[in-house]
Image (tube, helix red, strand yellow):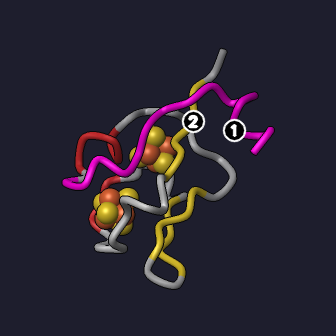
């Protein structure tokens, strides 16, 4: 099962740090919250960079249910 990033919007402060490390450029800060756009490859770079631990990797099918 492929993993994709999910942002916990309660934890995200919109700092934008994660948007600089994503190799495929799918992270975007909208209204002070990070959003994962289509095309995440589940590399985990954003998970490691986020000081607020707002991003986790989840199964792609679980994400689509939300
Ligand atoms: S690095 Fe973390 S807190 Fe900063 S915008 Fe990304 S998800 Fe939000
Ligand atoms: S897991 Fe990798 S590809 Fe997906 S949003 Fe984070 S940095 Fe980008």
SS at badge 1: helix
The answer to whether one can see residue 19 in this image is no
Write the residue at 57% across / 36% down.
4
Write the residue at 40% across / 46% down.
55
Q: Give left or right: position of 25 versus 20.
A: right
Residue situated in front as seen by the camera: 48 or 63: 63
Image position, residue 58 (x, y; %):
56, 30
Image position, residue 14 (x, y; %):
36, 74
Write the residue at 25% across / 40% down.
48
Tell me the tag on residue 20. Answer: none
- Does the segment drawn in magenta span residue 55? yes
The answer to whether one can see residue 28 in this image is yes
Residue, far left: 51
Q: In this figure, which residue is indicated by the disc labeled 2?
A: 4
Dot 2 and dot 1 residues touching (CB under 8 Å)? yes
Specify few, some or many for label 2: CA neighbours under 10 Å numbering under 14, 14-19, or 20 or more. Answer: many
Q: Quadrant of the C terminus?
A: top right
- Tally the numbered discs: 2
Choose mark 2 or mark 1, whichever is in front. Answer: 1
Separation (CA) of disc 2 from disc 1: 8 Å
Mark 2 lies within 8 Å of ligand 2 (Cβ measured): yes
Residue, far front: 10
The magenta region covers 51-66
Q: Is residue 15 above or below residue 2?
A: below
Q: In this figure, which residue is indicated by the disc labeled 1?
A: 63
Mark positioned earlier in the residue sequence (2 or 1): 2
Residue, far top: 1
Write the residue at 68% across / 30% down.
60
Quarter of the image where one finds residue 56: top left
Image position, residue 52 (x, y; %):
25, 55
Q: Give left or right: position of 5 versus 43.
A: right
């Amino acid at each position: 099962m492929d993993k994709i990033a999910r942002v916990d919007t309660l934890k995200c402060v919109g700092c934008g740090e994660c948007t600089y490390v994503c190799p495929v450029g799918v992270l975007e800060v909208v209204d002070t919250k990070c959003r994962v756009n289509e095309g995440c490859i589940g590399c985990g770079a954003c998970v490691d960079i986020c000081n607020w631990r707002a991003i986790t990797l989840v199964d792609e099918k679980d994400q689509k249910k939300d």
